[in-house]
Image: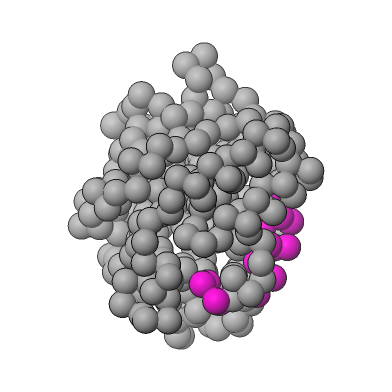
Amino acid sequence: MKCELCPRKCGVDRAEKRGFCGMSDKITAAKAMLHFWEEPCVSGDRGSGAVFFSGCVLKCVFCQNYDISTEDKGREISEERLEEIFLELQDKGAQNINLVNPTHFVPQILRSLEQAKRQGLKIPIVYNSGGYERVETLRMLDGVIDVYLPDVKYFSDELAVRLSAAPNYFDNAMSAVSEMLRQTGEPRFNESGAITKGVIVRHLVLPWQYRDSIEIVRRLGERFGKRIIFSLMSQYTPFGKVKTDPALSKMNRRITSFEYEKVLAEVIKADLRGFMQEKSSAKEEYTPIFDFEGL
């Protein structure tokens, strides 16, 4: 079957060869764990039950998970094993099931979730992605996903192509957020403050690109306003190609306080509600070690 799950629509039969994402049609993952470093309403006190999938439809040159997203490190697991992992995370007390970078495995994940729910999976399901989504794929998830956690990374098409080889990124991401919001409605929380329904849009401020970030914030505010939660991230840390490619040397630094504060001022102006990060979040030790734990 030709794969057209993401906007690239590369048309590869992944049963025969790997697509742009680097993956076959067999689920490949790198870790399953209780994750305490997501937004407070996602991790809660018990941790988010994160499953980190290998491969990626974006392959950003600065990805903090570069070894699994671009170098395709991972372990192949069956749909039956994924079902067991979901239930094991719930048994460990996970606040939710957090599908990290799941786009290219949507059909397989859906089958595993269906079986897991028959076996007693009850906690919310979080879809945590880079925002480069097809609305047609997201519609497959309608009624299954409780919380969407997409990035909106770029406004500039030139920037999206240069850093992620992702043409028309912004238009695709905004259409995706609109569909996600249609499915979930406005954010809802339980008695302990954990999110149970809704959309949290993340944006990572990049070196030299604060004007691009400001445009993203302005447009998110105009189109979605308080119907979404907005998470402004300062955790950019040089990883992947930006550490080795001379053509990307300007990206080989953390962001400045000036850059972050300029974008934060726009968030306040746009009257978006949500989260901000301290600059101390930009540390390599906050990136998980992908050692196949929990698989």
Tell which of 28 and 62 is nearer to you: 62
The kind of secondary structure the magenta stretch mainly shows is: helix
- What's the coloring here? one colour
**Compared to 148, does 24 lie above or below?**
below
Please tell me whether residue 207 is drawn above or below residue 12 in the rendered image: above
Q: Is residue 173 left or right of residue 147?
A: right
| Left or right: where 80 falls relative to 153 | left
Query: Height in image: 295 above or below 244?
Result: above
Front in this rendered view, residue 124 or 70? 70
Residue at screen point 50% across, 47% down:
258
Q: Residue at x 52, y 14 (%)?
A: 191
Q: Quadrant of residue 266?
A: top right
Q: Position of residue 213 (x, y in %)?
A: 61, 54
Considering only vertical position in the picture, is 104 above or below 148?
below
Write the start and end of the magenta stretch as one range. Answer: 162-178
Residue 251 in sight: yes
Percent of width and height locating residue 226: 71, 32
Residue 228 counted in the magenta span: no
x and y percentages locating residue 6 in the rendered image: 61, 68
Q: What residue is at 60 percent from the left and 81 percent from the top? A: 10
Question: Quick check: can you spot residue 76?
Answer: no
Question: Is residue 3 rendered to the left or right of residue 135?
Answer: left
**Residue 251 drawn at (x, y percent):** 42, 67
| Residue in the image at 70% along x and 32% along y | 271
- Count of numbered circles on the image: 0
